[in-house]
Amino acid sequence: MRMLVLGAGATGGYFGGRLLEKGEDVTFLVREKREQQLKKRGLIIKSVHGDVTLNPKTLRAGRGEDDPFDVVFIATKSYHLTEAMETVLPYVRDYTLVIPILNGMEHIEQLYSYFSKEQVIGGLCFIESTLNEHGDIIQTSPTHELVYGEWAGKDTNRMNQLKECLSGTKATFRLSGQIQQDMWHKYLFITTLSGITSLMRSSIGPIRDTLEGRTYIQQLFEEVRLTMVQAGAPIGAGIVEKQMELIERSDFQMKSSMLRDIEKGDRIEVDHLQGYLIRLAEKSGVETPLLKLIYHHLKVYEKNLA
C-alpha cells in the first residue's frame, strides 16, 4: 500500500519513519523548509527503541500534485487541521483510507466535511517525542503505539490488509475492534494530564506525589468522565481507576505535550480539548469547576501569547 504522511514532525515523522525503516512505501508531505532539512540531514530518529537515519521520499505541501495514495496519515495539531485537509485532498481517492492521529474527538466531524465516512477511520497514538533544534526526532518513552480501526469496529478486508502493512516495525501498530472507546479513553487521559500539568506548570511526578495534587487529578478525571458519559460516549467501567494506575506508573518527569508547548511559548489546543468538553458539559448540565478553571487559565495564556 502506498502511504502518505502529512508532515515529518515528532509524531508523523516517528511512525512514518518506522514504517519506512521496515521497507514500506512511505512518502512525507512537507513544507519547503522541512523538505530541504530532510534532503540535507535525512530523517533522523533518536529513540530508546533504536536510532535510525533514513532518506525519505517527499512531496512539497501546497503544490497539489495529482498523485493518489492508499493511506493518508494526518498527524497535526487541531488548529492546523483545516489547512491539513486541504493539503492532502489532491492525494485522496474514493478508496483512500484517511487516518487522523489527533487528540480529542471534535476533529472527526471536521474530517467528514472533506472526506466521506467510508474514507475516515479512527486513530490515536501514545508517544512522547519532540523535535530538537536540528529537526531530529527525539523519542524518549517506552510507549510508542499507534492504534487504528474501523469506526464501527468491524473486521474488514481493508483493515486486515492495512494490518499486514503496519506490522513488523520497531513501533507498535495495533488494530482495534473498539476504536471509538479507545479514542474517548485517550481523550479522557490526555485532557486530564494536559490540564493538570499545564495548570500546575509541572511534570506529573510532583503533582501526583502530594495529597492535594492527587485529589485534583482524581477530581478532574471524574469531571471529564461524567461529561463524556452524559454525552453518550462509550466509556468503560472503572476507567478512572485504570487511568490513575497509568498516572502512578508514569515517569516522575513526564510532561504533557501541551505543557511542553507552553514552555516553548507555542500555540495550544485548549479549545479542541478542554473547550469542547466544557461545551458538552454545558449542554447536559454537568458541573465541571476544575475543568473550567483550567480552561480559563489556558485562555489567559493564549491572550498573553497574542
Image (spheres, helix red, strand yellow):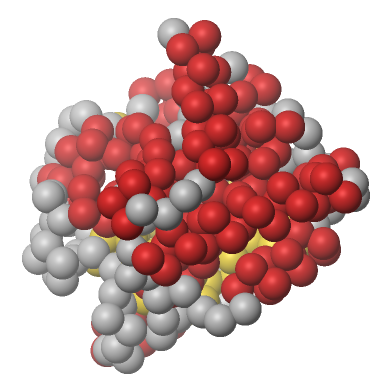
Residue 180 lies left or right of residue 298; in this view the side is: left
- At a point 21% along the width and 48% down the height, the residue shown is 110
Q: Is residue 116 visible?
A: yes
Residue 283 lies left or right of residue 261; in this view the side is: left
- At a point 12% along the width and 50% down the height, the residue shown is 113
- At a point 83% along the width and 45% down the height, the residue shown is 212
Query: Could you tell me residue 121's position as x and y percent?
Result: 29, 68
Query: Could you tell me residue 153's position as x and y percent?
Result: 33, 84
| Above or below, 37 relative to 128 | above
Q: Quadrant for residue 198, please give it.
A: top right
Q: Is residue 20 visible?
A: no
Query: Could you tell me residue 245's position as x and y percent?
Result: 76, 68
Q: Nearer the viewer, residue 280 or 197?
A: 280
| Above or below, 303 relative to 224 | above
Q: Nearer the viewer, residue 196 or 21?
A: 196
- At a point 36% along the width and 28% down the height, the residue shown is 31
Report the quarter where the N terminus lies: bottom left
Report the quarter where the C terminus lies: top left
Q: Quadrant for residue 264, please give it.
A: top right
Q: Quadrant for residue 155, please give it.
A: bottom left
